[in-house]
Image: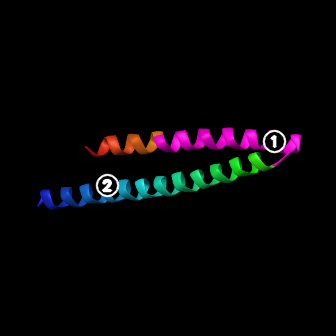
Amino acid sequence: MAEPARIFFLRRGSSAREQERQELARSLASTRVSLEQAYGGFNTTLDQDLIESYVYEINSLHARYNYLLRRMKELEGRRG
């Protein structure tokens, strides 16, 4: 009787990991789009204040992307 309960909880944990993986994938895709937009703005503006703003935004988005990618790799590592 204990075995079916154990299997239920293992499946439940797998589902939570899958949900986290999907959310990380969505966040990575969204961050990638934001990076493309920030680079587009940076490449088309001539205003020094906007250039500085885009530099900070791009650096921030890179840091976020690296964090999300690291979390995804950690999550994938736990699967095996």
For the point 38% across and 45% down, the residue is 75
Label 2 SS = helix
Query: Exactly how many numbered labels are in the figure?
Result: 2
Q: Nearer the viewer, residue 38 or 12?
A: 38
The residue that mark 2 highlights is 13
The residues tagged by marks 2 and 1 sit, at their Cα atoms, a distance apart of: 45 Å
The answer to which image quadrant residue 5 occupies is bottom left
Q: Is residue 65 magenta?
A: yes
The quadrant of the image that shows the C terminus is top left
* Residue 63 - label: none
Q: Residues within 10 Å of mark 2 (few under 14, many from 20)?
A: few
Q: Where is residue 69 in the image (x, y as percent from the top left)?
A: 48, 43
For the point 53% across and 55% down, the residue is 29
The residue that mark 1 highlights is 51
Q: Position of residue 61 (x, y in %)?
A: 64, 44
Q: Which amino acid does label 2 sit on?
A: Gly
Q: Magenta part of the protein: which range?
A: 45-69
Q: How crowded is mark 1: few (under 14 residues within 10 Å), some or many (20 or more)?
A: some
For the point 67% across and 38% down, the residue is 59
